[in-house]
Each structure stands twice: as structure tokens, then as C-alpha cells.
Image (cartoon, rainbow, N blue to C red):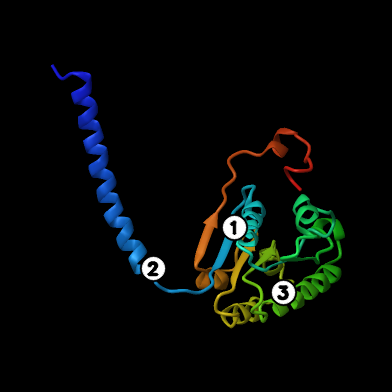
Amino acid sequence: MTDDSTLHDSKASSHQARMAARKVVMDKKIAKATEERGVLILLKGNGKGKSSSAFGTMARSAGHGQRCGVIQFSKGRMETGEYKFFRDHPLIDWKVMGHGFTWETQSKERDIEAAQQAWAAAEKLLRDDRYQILVFDEMSYMFKYGYLDVEPVIEALKNRPKMQNVIITGRTMALPLQDIADTISVVQDERHAFRLGVKAQPGIEF
């Protein structure tokens, strides 16, 4: 019969062997990652949390003393909690450009004008090497609804400063954006309180 101490030692030895093997694999991957440049991150999917993830990453960047820029394409209808929290931060420039969601404005011409103004501001940031991270919140809808052409955006992203990181959020992503992205994360929706009849609340939805 194996006593408890022997069984414990066996499990500990097995765990140590597995971790050592895993470390070898991870060390090889880390050694191969030698390129230094900014990345394009797409946060898509119909689940809740895409913008929250983007702003969390931005907060991390600001914590490292990096200058950040935000363009919100569709949330001009309200002051979000993130905007209220970050708007006076010395390292963060935040522009709310949209008039709201398209079903609220009910004016395609007004939405297109707002999208083009937002893109003009975003394009300017993409040429400025002082910014280490840019968040283009809900920009993807501009392509879905046909308010912006994707090709000029692709060109500007390709020609941005080498160390500049960009995060774009939205449910769907134009394929040309996905073709040039470095990281794509999908937030899935399995359940949402709104469909259960729970009213949207500050701090959770906005």
C-alpha cells in the first residue's frame, strides 16, 4: 500500500516534470518573438465586453506612461463612464464623434457626416508618432453601414508609426481589416441581462 507521503511526492514529481516540459515549449516561443512593432487588435463578436477590453488595455498603456488616443464613433448620445473617468487624464486624448446609434438619429446623411468627421480625426492620430496606442471604438459599424470606405483606413493603418498600437471594436469586422490584423479576439454572447428584462445601468452598460 502506498502511503500518503509517497503518493504526494509522486504527484509533485509528475507536476514538476510537466511544468518543466511546458517551460521548454514557452521559452522557445518567447525566443522566436523578436520583432518589435505596434500591433493591430480587432475585438469583435456579439457579446458584451469589447469596448471594456479595449479601454482596459488603454489603461494598462497609460500606466506605463504611454500617450493614448480614443475616437468613439457611435456613442455621442451619452457620456460613458469610461469617458468621465479618463477625459481629464494627462496622457489620454478622447474624442466623442458619433451622434448615437443609427436607429436613434434616423438620418443616414447625418450619420455619414459624423463618421467622416470621426475618421478625419482618427487619420490625424494615425500620423502622429507621439501616440503609442489608439482605440477606435465601434469603428467597425462604419464599414458595415457603408458610412466609410475601408481601403483608405487600411492604407492609413499600414503606414502608421512603427510602434503605434491600434485597437478597433465592433460586432463585425470588414475582411480587409481582418487580413492585416495581428490579434483578433471574439467576444461571444451566451446570455445577456437585457434580454431577461433587466434595464441598462450606469457602470455596467455605459
Query: Which residue does the numbered mark 1 point to in the structure image?
Result: 44
Q: Residue at x 80, y 60 (%)?
A: 88
Q: Residue at x 52, y 61 (%)?
A: 184
> Looking at the image, is mark 3 or mark 1 nearer the viewer?
3
**Would residue 88 be found to the left or right of residue 167 on screen?**
right
Q: CA distance from mark 2 to mark 3?
A: 29 Å
**Would residue 36 be found to the left or right of residue 110 on screen?**
left
Q: Amino acid at mark 2?
A: Ala
> Looking at the image, is mark 2 or mark 3 nearer the viewer?
2
Q: Residue at x 69, y 62 (%)?
A: 137
Which comes before the other along the chain, label 2 or label 3? 2
- Residue 126 position within the rendered picture, expressed as x and y whole percent measured from the top left: 66, 77
Query: Which residue does the numbered mark 3 point to in the structure image?
Result: 122
Give above or below for 26 relative to 139: above
Picture quarter with the N terminus: top left
| Depth order, front residue of 37/142 | 37
Q: CA distance from mark 3 to mark 1?
A: 19 Å
Which comes before the other along the chain, label 1 or label 2? 2
Q: CA distance from mark 1 to mark 2?
A: 25 Å
Q: Amino acid at mark 3?
A: Ala
- Residue 33: which disc? 2
Q: Amino acid at mark 1?
A: Lys
- Residue 168 position within the rendered picture, expressed as x and y whole percent measured from the top left: 63, 64
Q: Quadrant of residue 132?
A: bottom right
Give yes or no for contact between labels 1 and 2 (Cβ–Cβ under 8 Å).
Answer: no
Q: Callout 1: helix, strand or loop? A: strand
Q: Callout 2: helix, strand or loop? A: loop
Q: Quadrant of residue 136?
A: bottom right
**Would residue 42 be found to the left or right of residue 97 on screen?**
left
Which comes before the other along the chain, label 3 or label 1? 1
- Residue 57 position within the rendered picture, expressed as x and y whole percent measured from the top left: 60, 57
Seen from this angle, which residue lies furthest top? 1
